[in-house]
Image (spheres, helix red, strand yellow):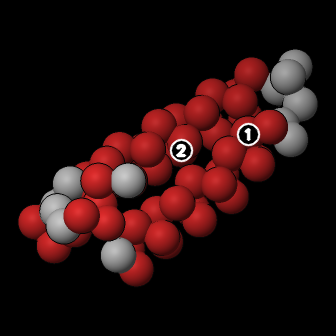
Amino acid sequence: MLDLGRAILRLEKVKGELLNTDPRDKEKLLAASRKVDELVMEYYRVKHSPETTGSAARR
């Protein structure tokens, strides 16, 4: 469950960076967007791992 919380915190941090990126800076937007994508995948990987498949993971 701790890993799931860490994944969420990392995702929220990078999401904030994405939202604060200048829309005219396409390179930074793309990099931040890719990082968000990676962290979303990490979140789902952690959420559906055998260690977290209990009832708390189904939220």
Tell me, yes or no, if residue 46 can be seen here.
Answer: no
Amino acid type at mark 1: Leu
Disc 1 secondary structure class: helix
- Quadrant for residue 25, please give it: top right
Query: Mark 2 or mark 1: which comes first in sequence?
Result: 1
Quick one: quadrant of the N terminus? bottom left
- Quadrant for residue 48, please give it: bottom left
Q: Is residue 6 left or right of residue 44?
A: right
Q: Is residue 23 left or right of residue 30?
A: right
How crowded is the residue under tag 1: few (<14 C-alpha within 10 Å), some, or many (20+)?
many
Residue 51 or 35: which is nearer the viewer?
Answer: 51
Q: Position of residue 21 (x, y in %)?
A: 83, 37
Gap between marks 2 and 1, in whole Å?
Answer: 9 Å
Residue 25 or 4: which is nearer the viewer?
Answer: 4
Q: Position of residue 24 (x, y in %)?
A: 87, 19
Which residue shows up at 73% across the image and 39% down it?
18
Which residue shows up at 59% across the image and 65% down it?
9
Q: Residue 18 bears which disc, if any? A: 1
- Up/down of 59 relative to 37, above or below: below
Disc 2 secondary structure class: helix
List the residue tagged with mark 2: 35
Q: Position of residue 45 (x, y in %)?
A: 25, 53
Amino acid type at mark 2: Lys
Which residue shows up at 89% across the image and 30% down it?
22
Tell me, yes or no, if residue 3 can be seen here.
Answer: yes
Q: Residue furthest left?
A: 50
Residue 59 or 30: which is nearer the viewer?
Answer: 59
